Amino acid sequence: MKRTILILGLICLFIISACNENNPVSPIQKGFISGQVTDYTTGQPIANVLVTTCPSSRTALTDNNGRFILENITTGEYRLIAEKNEFSPSSSKVSVLSNDTTDIAVPMKLSLNKYGLLYGLLTDEKSSPLDSVEVIISDGAETIADTITDSKGFYSIALPFGKYYVTLSKSNYQPVDKDVEVLKNQAINLNVVLIKTEIEIPIPSKSELYVYYSFNVDPGTTNVTDNSANGFNGTLMNKDCVYETGKFGNCIRLIGKPGITGCWIKLPCAMNLPEFTVNMWVKEISSNWGSGQAYFQAGNNSNSVCLIARNAFFSIVSNTSELDYNFAVGAINTSGASNTPITLADNGYDPYAWNMFTLVYKKEGLMDAYINAKLVGSKNQAFNINPSGNIGINVQWWSGDGATRLTACYDEFRIDKSALSTTKIERLYKENKY
């Protein structure tokens, strides 16, 4: 009996072996899926998209060019799923073949129920596309998002609904600022031409300068460097600021808050000069003005003041809620006495664009005021500043003791030890040098 069982077992093994030789077991077949994920509206690549297969096999994230690859996928039919927060999920059919790569284009539509799209083309004056242009989106106080243009000058960025402040900048080109509103179910097109500038950023002669803040070096949270070499480094008060691209090189954004807690720069010097020129570039970010705020102030209203401001306190227009530009030296008071500022309505100037403000004081007691190198007023007025009075940028001149609600960007602040001529002021405006 045992012998019979043994013989039957050997026969079975022989049969199985013969079957395997005639019908060998095939190895599992594998393939690859590669592709690019793009924006359905603009055709631009989308980075950091999660790509996976259904049935589940492999996952990957797209790179900066929107490209991805899924390796060693078992052959067969799949659904390719692409997901990213601000976009509606995308699903595409794909077949995986043995030892082959299936390439697929995956378009994704922005989820317009939650987000809007800002996109555009940036070119130079000759309509040539500009790559690597920095696009910064902010809400006026902090950066919300940023991107750069591709090799074809194109950019796109998904944003929640709302109003934004857009800064476009590239080395050797004049920066451009725009206000945009992103709306539901809309893609906003913003095409911009950047103007090339060959302007260098020279440091003026130190013998001519009393104070010079170029803001080209990040001030951090303590001091602002005085580039005049006179050692008058400014102190950042309340320390709420942003360092960003400015009119020439970089600038500083000083952020205002209610009360006297906003950020301002305190200068350690005194305005006890027989003649001088105060020159500065300013771009307002918020319009939450209150009486007594100034771009620049020295002293205060109880003694003697040097002032460049835009506010409603010395209003010359019928609607006192409107704002005026004010330039002043000498005592300031509320009774309309002889020592009142040069005041002009601010219509015709865009406070949310870069403007250059210049106040010139001459030995003979003559004050000249300029906006963008154009003389806007002159006045005979003696000036005898109290050397102990506070001097500051973005400051509350009522008391000389802090900024209130104004948020603004400042660039190329300087006090010259002489009364600059109109020709020099025009050169400063055009070339940032004498």
Image (cartoon, rainbow, N blue to C red):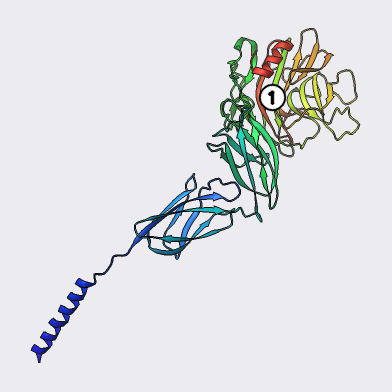
Q: Observer-nearest residue: 388 or 77?
A: 77
Q: Residue at x 69, y 22 (%)?
A: 280
How many numbered marks, from 0 up? 1
Locate residue 256 relative to residue 150 in the image: left or right.
right
- In the rendered image, residue 184, in percent from the top left (x then y), is placed at 70, 52
Badge 1 crowding class, 10 Å Cα cut-off, few under 14, some 14 to 19, many 20 or more, is many
Q: Which residue is pictured at 65% across the width and 14% down the height? A: 210
Circle 1: residue type:
Trp
Q: Could you say where residue 309 lies in the image, as x and y percent from the top left? A: 77, 26
Q: Residue furthest front?
A: 22
Q: Nearer the viewer, residue 231 or 99?
A: 99
The residue shown at (88%, 33%) is 320
Quadrant in which residue 372 is drawn: top right
x%, y% of residue 305?
A: 78, 20
Question: In the orientation shown, which residue stands out farthest toward the bottom?
Answer: 1
Of helix, strand and loop, which one carries label 1? strand
The x and y percentages for residue 355 are 72, 25
Residue placed under numbered mark 1 in the picture: 281
Q: Is residue 237 visible?
A: no
Horizontal side of residue 82 vs 300, given as left or right = left
